[in-house]
Amino acid sequence: MSNQGGLRERKKEATRQAISDVATELFVARGFDNVSVAEIAEAAEVSRMTVFNYFPRKEDLFFDREEESRQMLRAALAERPDGEAPLMTLRNLVHSLADRAHPFAKFTDATAKFWRTVAESPALSARAREMRDELIDDLATLLAGAIKRPLADADARLAAAMVITALTVAYAEGLREHKARRSAASSRAAVLQVMERSFSGIAAMLKDTPYV
Amino acid sequence: MSNQGGLRERKKEATRQAISDVATELFVARGFDNVSVAEIAEAAEVSRMTVFNYFPRKEDLFFDREEESRQMLRAALAERPDGEAPLMTLRNLVHSLADRAHPFAKFTDATAKFWRTVAESPALSARAREMRDELIDDLATLLAGAIKRPLADADARLAAAMVITALTVAYAEGLREHKARRSAASSRAAVLQVMERSFSGIAAMLKDTPYV
DNA sequence: GTAAATATTATACTGAGTACAAATTTATGG
DNA sequence: CCATAAATTTGTACTCAGTATAATATTTAC
């Protein structure tokens, strides 16, 4: 027990990565719905059951950065300066991501292809929507927890839904702009324009709450 | 051909209704995921294939008012008085629904049970999310079509996403209020409060666009 | 080196959804 | 009323995701 870099741990990580790599390759080449789990298992030289051991649902083979966005929100809110409004923290986070060209705010041909693969698969689209809703729930809980007063929960749920919706629309516009013009600068501008307008509206929405 | 009240048409409608009724009964009694399509077919005295003929996906047996909300939005926007801002039209629509205690804005034990059944089934939840996104796309198209100027599309997409998100959150708060207090008046108040705040914020968001 | 813990595999199953052809039922034209 | 066309229903056989369970192999710990 407690064997950090033991052989077993390393092997597990290796097979997990091998399965994920093989799967990603097959998905982008032929489309998510045209690749069966059995094929992936065979290509990864592993049994079908092992694939399901590591990735309970087939969609998990495609989306593997679910946790990251959650952690980012959590960290940003936890480390926010005393007295800063949560909504401002989130706005700053978006700007910071855009400035650093973080993967979540970057638009390349690879990201376009990634989301095209998602759009072409009902299962992947459904999973993306599910992740979005989970993120809203998480953010609502974080926001409610960031504020002492009771009965702020309804406000937190509205704020969370609005912020994540704004992010989603902004990202979609950034992607659209990339496909149209292929300019990193114009994509970034499109994202930030939607975000700025959205945040100012959300601030108006929540002006009498502790979140703004 | 063109036989409106022909025997064939009547029989089709009857079997469709019979299947739907039997399915609904089984679903609320035992939960969506604990009832198989084969069982429904047997209970409706019809073959499994016939069920899939009428309802391509199992989820369609549960949600049968998808088209209605779409039509309502379309009609409201199409019949809006000259010069009225689309956003105001949508706000008025919500108030009208709440005043008339329309099924979409009513909260009873039956609605609570309906949405509990949805929440307990991953498949139904996924379908509900899908319908929500389809409604956003539809509304975006309607809004863009309601305005002459070009390049208003991005605004329309933001407006549509925000309005439907507001409706969703408002409805959820109404449902929550019903479960907590079981008062029609307080549920209605909860819905309208979220809607009013949301619409004023969305109006601020879109203040320099033709939608407000 | 042996025994316990943990990963992997084989097998068999359920249930949704699809393809396709056969059989039944309704409509239509004489 | 009959024959034939059109539409509906059904039977059969299939694919694939996901689950359950028990057997087997591999790593770890003592």
Image: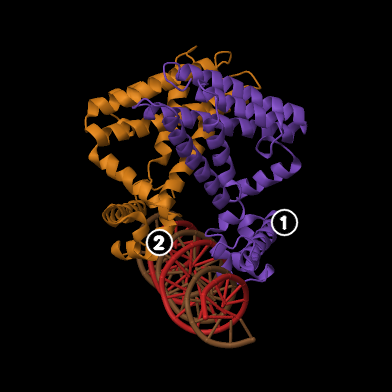
Chain colours: A orange, B purple, C red, D brown
Amino acid carrying label 2: it is Thr
Question: Image height check: is A48 above or below A82?
Answer: below
Q: Counting other residues with Cα less than 10 Å from the Cα at mark 2, is it few (<14), some (14-19), or many (20 or more)?
A: some
Judge whether residue A72 can be spotted in this image: no
Amino acid carrying label 1: it is Ala
Do pointers 2 and 1 mark residues of a single chain?
Answer: no
- Which residue is more in the foreground, D27 or A28? A28
Q: Residue at x 28, y 41 (%)?
A: A112
x, y percent for residue B202: 50, 21
Q: CA distance from mark 2 to mark 1?
A: 36 Å
Marker count (numbered): 2
x, y percent for residue B9: 62, 63
Q: Counting other residues with Cα less than 10 Å from the Cα at mark 1, is it few (<14), some (14-19), or many (20 or more)?
A: few
x, y percent for residue A5: 33, 47
Q: Callout 2: residue from which chain?
A: A
- Which residue is more in the foreground, A60 or B64? B64
Judge whether residue A127 can be spotted in this image: yes
Callout 2: SS: helix
The answer to whether residue A146 is left or right of residue A127 is right
Q: Residue at x 37, y 57 (%)?
A: A33
If the image is split into quadrants, where does the N terminus of chain B sit? bottom right
Callout 1: SS: helix
Comparing marks 2 and 1, which lies closer to the viewer?
1
Q: Read off the residue under disc 2.
A: A50
| Residue A145, picture quadrant | top right
Q: Residue at x 45, y 38 (%)?
A: B137
Q: Read off the residue under disc 1.
A: B29
Residue reaching furthest top? Answer: A83
* The disc label shown at residue B72, or none: none
Q: Callout 1: residue from which chain?
A: B
| Residue B96, picture quadrant | top right
x, y percent for residue D17: 45, 60
